């Protein structure tokens, strides 16, 4: 996967500066970012700085089983790993920040959390309009809530949120995503669909870049309204919220125990990780089907509540499609 390239034109008063953050293990999020950023790179009015995040101790890909599990306590507690020095000084003045991130254990991935907790992030983001871009399996609702908190700590203004998920059913991705992350192959499980965001959705993400180009040329990033409405930016599934809340609580409590037992990577965490996985599998096989059945039975009575939650999580950009025909290539 070719790295994302920074294009910086000579500063001129009319040229807008855009900061794009980048971290991706499989290349999926990098590819989505490229699809969004390319329309901006091809336009002479923008100078784009791509900052690639590099944890001091790189996360493995493909993941080893224990390394993968061992990432949950720090992810859930948003304890950031040290990053290699950034190429920015903090004095740069960007007009827009594009912040793509993946979800790790229902929280923003550790490298992106590390950036947002870095002392430079406050300097770079204070008062700046930010567009978040999520690419994950399909559970991102509470991660975005955490992201909002991290952005608020930096004083940033969240204008838009774009979300791309694996289009396969939740139950299928429950197997195909870990198989991909542990094997390095999207099609590792025969007979099941390939894991990850589909190629057509990645290509179609360019519509966000074209819409951002037009919005920036009209100085709309200076206002408070979202720039990416009508483009089906975030189509949330509030039915997943119950599972996300249960998972978040469990990751948090067990994460606390594991963090008390040892540091990431230490052998003494392993027996507890085995215990946790056993607990998790028992939970998934027993409680989850019952809770899904209950939810299905209650759905007719929860329709209004679910509609309100959908609107809340789709915001700010929304799931409307009224501008798709203008920006779809
Ligand atoms: C440690 C780990 C935990 C993950 N947890 C979640 C999760 O809670 N929810 C989700 O939708 N996707 C989850 N994913 C999938 C990622 O969000 C992402 O789609 C995938 O890792 C590919 O990202 P990449 O661009 O870094 O290659 C997880 C991935 C990893 C590596």
Image: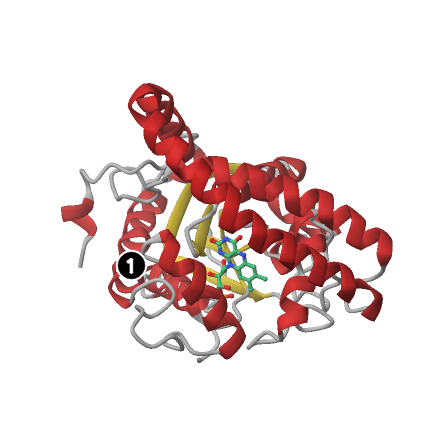
Q: Is mark 1 within 8 Å of ligand 1?
A: no
SS of the residue under disc 1: helix
In what quadrant of the picture does the C terminus appear? Answer: bottom left
Q: Position of residue 293 (x, y in %)?
A: 38, 36
In depth, the one of 75 and 200 nearer the eye is 75
Q: Is residue 13 above or below residue 302?
A: below
Residue shown at the point (78%, 54%) measured from the top left: 258
In depth, the one of 174 and 204 nearer the eye is 174
Q: Position of residue 180 (x, y in %)?
A: 46, 72
For the image, the number of numbered tags is 1
Residue shown at the point (38%, 75%) measured from the top left: 189
Q: Is residue 166 above or below residue 143?
A: below
Residue shown at the point (34%, 33%) measured from the top left: 296
In what quadrant of the picture does the N terminus appear? Answer: bottom left
Query: Is 86 left or right of 219, judged from the image as shown?
Result: right
Per the image, the residue denoted by label 1 is 206
In depth, the one of 79 and 86 nearer the eye is 79
Res 188 visible: yes
Q: Is residue 300 above or below residue 144?
A: above
Q: Position of residue 317 (x, y in %)?
A: 36, 37
Q: Is residue 304 above or below residue 158?
A: above
- Structure colour scheme: secondary structure
Find the residue positioned furthest to the left.
325
Q: Determine crowd level at label 1: few under 14, some 14-19, many 20+ residues with C-alpha closer than 10 A.
A: many
Residue shown at the point (40%, 77%) measured from the top left: 188
């Amino acid at each position: 996967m070719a790295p994302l390239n920074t294009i910086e034109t000579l500063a001129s008063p009319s040229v807008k500066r855009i900061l794009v953050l980048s971290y991706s293990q499989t290349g999926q999020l990098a590819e989505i970012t490229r699809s969004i950023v390319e329309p901006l790179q091809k336009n002479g009015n923008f100078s784009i700085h791509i900052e690639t995040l590099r944890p001091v101790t790189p996360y493995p890909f493909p993941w080893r089983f224990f390394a993968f599990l061992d990432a949950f306590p720090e992810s859930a507690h948003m304890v950031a790993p040290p990053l290699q020095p950034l190429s920015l000084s903090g004095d740069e003045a960007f007009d827009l920040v594009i912040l793509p991130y993946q979800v790790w254990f229902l929280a923003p991935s550790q490298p992106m959390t590390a950036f947002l907790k870095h002392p430079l992030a406050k300097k770079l983001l204070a008062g700046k309009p930010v567009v978040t871009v999520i690419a994950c399996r399909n559970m991102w609702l509470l991660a975005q809530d955490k992201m909002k908190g991290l952005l608020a700590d930096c004083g940033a203004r969240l204008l838009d949120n774009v979300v791309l998920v694996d289009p396969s059913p939740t139950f299928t991705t429950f197997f195909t995503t870990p198989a991909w992350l542990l094997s390095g192959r999207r099609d590792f499980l025969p007979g099941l669909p390939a894991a990850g965001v589909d190629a057509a959705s990645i290509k179609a993400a360019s519509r966000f870049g074209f819409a951002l180009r037009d919005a920036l040329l009209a100085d709309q990033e200076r206002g408070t309204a979202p720039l990416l409405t009508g483009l089906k930016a975030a189509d949330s599934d509030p039915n997943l919220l119950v599972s996300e809340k249960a998972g978040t609580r469990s990751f948090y409590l067990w994460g606390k125990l594991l963090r008390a037992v040892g540091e990431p990577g230490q052998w003494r965490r392993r027996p507890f990780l085995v215990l946790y996985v056993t607990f998790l599998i028992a939970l998934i096989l027993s409680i989850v089907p019952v809770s899904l059945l209950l939810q299905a039975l209650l759905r007719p009575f929860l329709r209004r509540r679910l509609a309100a939650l959908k609107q809340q999580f789709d915001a700010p950009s929304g799931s409307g499609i009224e501008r798709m025909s203008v920006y779809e290539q």
